[in-house]
Every structure is written in C-alpha cells, then in structure tokens.
Amino acid sequence: MTIRLSSIQKIYKVGVERVHALRGVDLEIKRGEFVAIMGSSGSGKSTLMNILGCLDRPSNGEYVLNGKPVAKMGASALAEVRNQEIGFVFQSFELLPRSSALQNVMLPLIYSPKRWLGARKRARHALERVGLGERVKHRPNQLSGGQRQRVAIARALVNEPSILLADEPTGNLDSKTSEEIIALFKRLHSDGQTIVIVTHEEDIAGHAERIVRLKDGRVMSDRKTAEDPIHREYLDRMAVAAADMAKHDAANAASNGERSPAIPGLPGSGEPRVTVAGAGSASPAVVRPGGAGGGA
Ligand SMILES: Nc1ncnc2c1ncn2[C@@H]1O[C@H](COP(=O)(O)OP(=O)(O)OP(=O)(O)O)[C@@H](O)[C@H]1O
Ligand SMILES: [Mg+2]
C-alpha cells in the first residue's frame, strides 16, 4: 500500500470563520495505480492533493505514506519525503522563468546531496523520458504550453518518486495537447509509476483506472473507471453524439452528391466517378454511412 488516508479532515480558519474543506476522507491507493480525482469546484480536490503531497497537514485523521505515519515526521523528514517520494505537477507548470528546461529539472536534485553527483545526466534523462531531449537549453518562454508541462513532469520525475501527483495538469492546455500529456501519463503508468491526477474533464479521467469523486469534502464515489456510472453515462452520451454526427455527415454527403476517391487497381480507377452514398451502388470505392457495407 502506498497511500492510506483515514478520516482525514481539513478545516481552514479565515478570520472567525471555519471552512470544512475535507470532512472525513478515507482513501487507499496501491502502488502502481492510476487514479483520477474529480468533483465540482470547491469540493476539496486540491486540499486533498496538498495533503497527499505533504504540502499541507490534515486537521484530523491519519495519513500513512509508504507504511509511515506522516504526522509523526519532523520537519526535515517531511522535507525529505516531499523531495524523494513525491512528484507534484501543477496546472500552471510553476517553472523558473529564467532557467533552462535542464536547470528547472535539476532543481529538486539540489536538495538531494546523494543525487547531486550526475545531476545533469539524470535531468537530461528525465527530459528524454518526456520527449524533450532536444529542448534542454530552452527557457519556459521558448517552449509551448504542452512542452512546459512536460518539463514540469520531468522535474516531478527526476528523483524517481513513488507517487506522481498532478492537480489539473491539463487545465491550461488545449484538447490536443491535453491528449498528449495524458498519453505521457499513461506511458509512465505502464512503466509502473503510481499516479493521482485531479481533473474536471471526463475524457481525461477516462484514461485512469479508477475515479474518486468528491462532494463537499467527502468521497461521494470511488470506483473502477469502467464501473463508474457517471463516466459510463458520459461515454453513452459521446457515442450517441458521434452517431448523430455520422448520420448528419452522411445526410449532407447524400444531398451534395459525393465524389468517390479513385482506388488504384479497381475498374474505372483514375476516372473520377460521382456516386451518391447510400444510394445502392455496389462500388467498393463508396464508403457507406453506418458501416452498411458490412453485409450484416
Ligand atoms: N487556504 C485556504 N484558506 C481557506 N479556505 C480554503 C483554502 N484553500 C481552500 N479553501 C476552501 O476549501 C474548499 C475546498 O477548496 P479546494 O481548493 O480544495 O477545492 P477544489 O476542489 O480544488 O476546487 P477547484 O476545482 O476550483 O480547484 C473551498 O471551499 C475553498 O474555498
Ligand atoms: Mg483545485
């Protein structure tokens, strides 16, 4: 077991007011798992991540990390755990603007005297792992958003942490770049990395093995992704939308009259033919909507 949280509460005091950000969270995460944490804004996701990452302490409850109760750790033990056991990735990357990718990634090694020897090589290797071996000298403003987040991920990985935590890592990225980042997480996960990621996007969460949903500081549900009813409903909705879109495209193609592509080796190839999709032509060059050519 990598992570065990029991009855975790977090109460923030703001003036005389008390905000119950977490109201008794129980959560276990095993080594090698890939977990998504979801929930509406203010439900306590970042508070939970900060506790998991030992950036903050719970007001009540117990956190056991790799078999050790975090509450019993002194300041220096805690700093060591944060540096060695945990890699944190943030929505806003949090890179040093005047430092190169390589220097950014080397940063956690400075606090790790054992690892300072060969730090450059290690950092370079971490950058290669995230596909940025060619960008080591670039400063953050010389990189794209997705590349910046890759640098941040390399920095999180450079000490080979037991857990990679990412709080909305794709929150500032467009959907194509988000897909690239999530593909990177999947690759790291298949290499054995334990990953916990916060996201608002069902499609991003769909790449994790398990979804934990928070509501008002409590765990509302905790299921395998494939068995999560909200996620299944989302997939059903997407399937219906995709089918509607295909029908719509087919109807458009039919009303416009579709030009079939010429396929080498077929009779009549090279001469563009105009056929109407779905109008009964037997030509294999015509792609019928809804896979109607399957002969079912
Ligand atoms: N440092 C703080 N001081 C006081 N209250 C806080 C603090 N941090 C968070 N809160 C409150 O705790 C609750 C949970 O906040 P948290 O940031 O964990 O939510 P979240 O689920 O991450 O939301 P979002 O999706 O918007 O990032 C909120 O009501 C928030 O206002
Ligand atoms: Mg948050």
Image (cartoon, grey):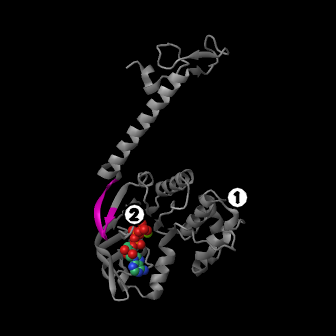
Ligand 2 lies in which image quarter?
A: bottom left
Residue underneath mark 1: 134
Residue 122 lies in the magenta stretch: no
Judge from the rendering whether residue 263 lies leftward or rightward of residue 11; answer left or right: right
Is any part of residue 228 visible from this angle? no
Label 2 close to label 1 by CB (< 8 Å): no
Is any part of residue 211 visible from this angle? yes
Q: Position of residue 166 (x, y in %)?
A: 48, 65
Quadrant, the N terminus: bottom left
181 vs 69, nearest the viewer: 181
Judge from the rendering whether residue 180 lies leftward or rightward of residue 23; answer left or right: right
Using the image, determine if residue 229 lies above or below residue 157. Answer: above
Residue depicted at 32% across the width and 74% down the height? 22
Q: Residues within 10 Å of mark 1 (few under 14, many from 20)?
A: few
Using the image, determine if residue 157 lies above or below residue 83. Answer: above
Q: Residues within 10 Å of mark 2 (few under 14, many from 20)?
A: some
Over which residues does the magenta segment extend?
Answer: 213-224
Helix, strand or loop for the magenta stretch, by majority: strand
Quadrant, the C terminus: top left
Amino acid type shown at disc 2: Arg
Amino acid type shown at disc 1: Glu
Q: Secondary structure at mark 2?
A: loop
Residue underneath mark 2: 31
Q: Which mark is in front, 2 or 1?
A: 1
Residue depicted at 64% across the width and 74% down the height? 96
Q: Residue 57: which quarter of the image?
A: bottom left
Q: Residue 119: which quarter of the image?
A: bottom right
